[in-house]
Amino acid sequence: MERLALGVPLALLALCGLLLGAGATTDPVGKAAVVRNVATIATPATAPVRLQTNAAVFQNNVIATGAKSAVGIILADTTQFSIGANAQVRIDDFIFDSKRNASKMTISFVKGAFRFVSGKPTHGYPGQTAIVTPAGTIGIRGTIVTGVIGPDALKLYQQINPAIAQAGEASETATLIILSDPGDEGGGIDLTARGEVTSLRKAGQALYFPSQGSPPLPPIVVGPRLRGMIERQAGPPSFGRPAGMPGPQNGRDQQRAGPGSSAGPPRAGGGDIGQRGAPGNGGPPR
């Protein structure tokens, strides 16, 4: 009986420890800086609720948008990402060491148009920030990346490269990835798919995957005009763009893989991208 009585308090202490450990992951990782029209937020095993501007966002949150809607998220390390209409994204993992000013994360974009602007603290954990898409995993190096997932990816790619044709309907997992800005010297992205790595290092370089599990078509460069149009579909107007940034310039939209245009979005990884504002008050969706 004494052994049983001793075991009960120990079991209770263990349970309390588990509960405290679970609570350690409930701190906000950022906030919804911009919410345009209708968007929802949810955590696993909970129903989606309406997402409001300045609401806190948490690890494992799933954020989705409706028609003619968009969301812009600012994380605690100044990293920004946004999604356009009828899109979905999940925050899989986020770690920010404020003492070292270093961060790493995994963000999964599931469908729709998206844009990702890495914050400077991601340099503190080189190679440990990743974007996950149906096509594969994108390793980030102080970069701005734009993408489209779903049938619209094929429509846009056909504007970039009119010679491409595809029989039947476009796949729901068709993926177009564009390096909007490689950031500082040595920046860019490494996309791993089917065990093979494709590196993009010049602004405007793009890869198109017809479907999940398929190899990419050869890299191609997107001209600044069409690139600007795609970027505008990937989030709220002006989100992630400092005031005074020049807009897209006229130019040819189809250029075979080669040097990208010098015009383009703001440089990635700089302190002038986004803000360090504290996440909004409020807890995870109930």
Image: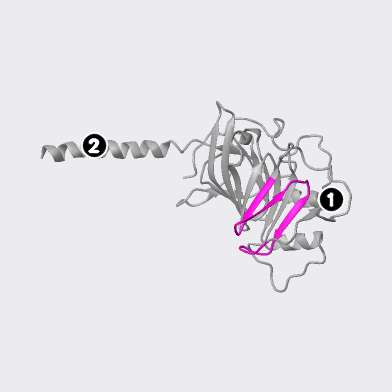
**x, y percent for residue 7:** 19, 39
Q: Which residues are magenta?
A: 189-215
- Give the residue at the far left of this rendering: 1
- Residue 175 occupies quadrant: bottom right
Task: Look at the image and tell me whether residue 212 can be seen.
Answer: yes
Three-letter code, disc 2: Leu
- Residues 174 and 143: in front is 143
Task: Look at the image and tell me whether residue 68 can be seen.
Answer: no
**x, y percent for residue 20:** 37, 36
Label 1 sits on a secondary structure element that is helix
- Give the number of marks: 2
Relative horizontal placement of residue 159, taking residue 285 as reference (left or right): right
- Residue 133 occupies quadrant: bottom right
Residue that label 1 marks: 225
Three-letter code, disc 1: Arg
Relative horizontal placement of residue 228, taking residue 133 as reference (left or right): right
| Residue 179, placed above or below residue 3 | below
Q: CA distance from mark 1 to mark 2?
A: 65 Å
Residue that label 2 marks: 10
Residue drawn 78% across the image and 67% down it: 164
